[in-house]
Structures are given as structure tokens and as C-alpha cells.
Amino acid sequence: MTPSRGSVVRPDRNADPVAGVRVAGTADRDRIVALLARAFADDPAMAYIFPDPADRALRLPRLFGVLFDSDASSGIRLVTAGGEAATLWRAPGANV
């Protein structure tokens, strides 16, 4: 099942909706990109890829912007109602 924009994500018809989680739209982009960039700023993998903290601070928003945009057609973008949590998902084998 592919949820429509703004709909509540339901794991299946017999389950309760996941409280406050919805498909993220383009209006959520800036907030989600900034949120994910902050969340991964100290991540060991990101620190390995971008060793300089100042460089990492500039590049992570760009990286998550590309991922957010590409997930529009090949994945799913979810955000909580208050925007305090988000995730970007892509099906196995789907490329940027």
C-alpha cells in the first residue's frame, strides 16, 4: 500500500494508525533536511565521509536534500505531526 500525501500511515487495515505519522510533502523539505543534518552531524559514518566538522555542516544539508528529492519517486518520506522526527525510505535496489 502506498499512502497518499498527508494521509495517516496504516500498517494494515486491522491495525490502529501510527499516531501522528504522515507522508511528508515538499512543504516539509527544509525542516526535514535540517533535522536530518543535525541528527547525523556527529554520526561516525558521516564523520568518516566528511572529516572536517565545518565541511560536514555544509554538506549534510545538501546530501539530505538530494535524498529527500529523490525519495519522492523511488521511496517514501515520513514525518511526525510536529516535525520532531522524520525518515526517508527507499525500496531495495532503488538508486538515487
Image (cartoon, rainbow, N blue to C red):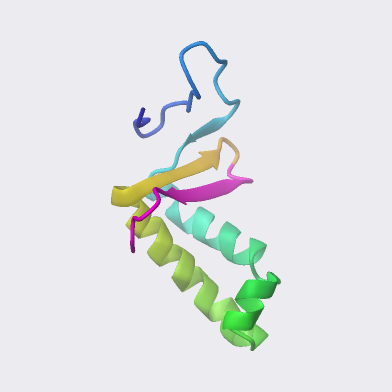
Task: Answer with the quarter of the image where residue 47 lies.
Answer: bottom right
Residue 46, given in percent of the width and then of the height, sits at: 61, 74
- Name the quarter where the C terminus is drawn: bottom left
Please name the residue shown 35% across and 32% down the image: 2
In the picture, measured across the screen, residue 21 lies left or right of residue 96, that is: right
Please name the residue shown 53% across and 72% down the image: 60
Residue 37, given in percent of the width and then of the height, sits at: 58, 66
Residue farthest along the left direction in this orientation: 73
- The rendered magenta stretch, by its main secondary structure, is classed as loop
- Name the quarter where the N terminus is drawn: top left
Residue farthest along the bottom direction in this orientation: 52
Please name the residue shown 53% across and 48% down the image: 87
Task: Answer with the quarter of the image where residue 20 lies.
Answer: top right
Q: Is residue 49 above or below residue 21?
A: below
**Magenta-drawn segment:** 83-96
Residue farthest along the front direction in this orientation: 93
Q: Nearer the viewer, residue 18 or 92?
A: 92
The verdict on residue 25 being magenta is no
In the picture, measured across the screen, residue 96 lies left or right of residue 83, that is: left
Please name the residue shown 53% across and 42% down the image: 79
Q: Is residue 47 above or below residue 92?
A: below
Q: Nearer the viewer, residue 27 or 93?
A: 93
